[in-house]
Image (spheres, helix red, strand yellow):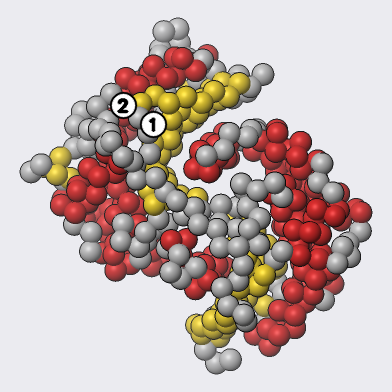
Amino acid sequence: MTQVTQRDLMPGVRLTAVQTHKFKSNQLSVTLLAPLAAETASANALLPYVLRRGTRAHPDLESLSAALDELYGGSIEPAVRKKGEAQCLGFVASFLDDAYAPEGAGILEGAARLLGDLLLRPVTEDGGFRKEYVEGERSNLVDRIQAQVNEKRSYSLLRLTQEMCAGEPYGVDRLGDEESAAAVTAEGLWARYQTLLAQAPVELYYCGSADADRVAAALTAALDSLPRAEELDEPDHGVQDNATQDQPRLVTEAMDVTQGKLALGFRTGGACVWEDDYPALLVFNALYGGTPTSKLFLNVREKLSLCYFASSSLEKFKGIMVVSSGIEFRNYEKAKAEILAQLDNCRAGAFEDWELEGARRAVVSALRSTMDAQGRLEDYWLGQAVAGLAEPPQDLVDRVEAVTRAQVTAVAQKMELDTIYFLKGKED
């Protein structure tokens, strides 16, 4: 039996507690929500990594590791995520459930205390962050941003998003950009930290066997010194319903690559996580390109051999669907035409009952597997918190089960091609 409880612990601080005996470990996370913006994205992304370097009581990684060992080998890792136009930064902790610990161990309280210390009581020097820690983690962040180009599939989707959503907050990467990251100073980061502590909404999450009252008490005590401003800086969510131009934009880049990357960005006509047709959107995406039995996989890849891979995915908070494919440079026109032809098939209802049911089963299976994986469950509930929703996975499963062929066709007809990104070889 799983019980989900949501409550406010203090102004702008909300707890989602999932009480279950399904897992031997607990998951605990603290996440600050900030509006995604080019000016602050890199500093925000850097902050959890600097905070994770040490607290007043445990001023270095060795001391922190010893503290985690005392929690029977627990872990606390920095996390920087992007949910629509919200940048989510904080920590995700995993530790032994008290039900499997020696009597009276109280691991939950110890983990909550350490999490609170990491967020609120960092090691300092001269009234700010230790410069050595900021410089080291800043260099690591710059390296991570630079390394994005090395994985060409994800890089092509990053570039598609930047071009498609230029001028929109969603066009900003979760890590920010290299120039901004390199310019972050210890003083500037400390100022940003103070602003976030006071103004950012905070989402807390717990999954384990402890009851919600005990979890709330432990986290309230751990965060008792969290400053709160009268007005919080809530992230907004802008959904652009339709393509921004009459004709799709084409962005072409050349690199020293042997395989082309073709990425297409679609506006969903307003279909997103807040709308009634969201379950139909999930089934449509699975039918079109989200599974190994999808239209894109079976036709563009398997039947016609026009690409090495082809798949579609959704940004449910932004009303965007993207198609990612790897192709021979010479197959650009053919692959693009067939990708769009398969979308037309979905719009026309030209798919078999087994295809529709296979897509539905894939969505249902993914949602049910979310309930069996702590990391995915934490990410699901963070997304719900960002969206201001409280629907559990099982309720969404029930809505997916009720999706009809007509609803899938209707949501397919709302798709509008906005931007095409093609990464080709330098000699092509």
Give me the disc on residue 39. Answer: none
- Can residue 21 be seen in this snapshot? yes
Q: CA distance from mark 1 to mark 2?
A: 10 Å
Give me the disc on residue 13. Answer: 1
Return the residue at label 2: 223
Please tell me whether residue 98 is drawn above or below residue 182 in the rendered image: above
Residue type at numbered disc 2: Leu
Please tell me whether residue 80 is drawn above or below residue 299 in the rendered image: above
Query: Residue 290: percent from the left, percent from the top?
Result: 72, 57
Quarter assignment of residue 408? bottom right
Q: Nearer the viewer, mark 1 or mark 2?
A: 1
Residue located at (40% from left, 55% from top): 36
84 sits to left or right of 305: left
Please report contact status of discs 1 and 2: CB closer than 8 Å, yes or no. yes
Residue located at (80% from left, 53% from top): 407
217 sits to left or right of 248: left
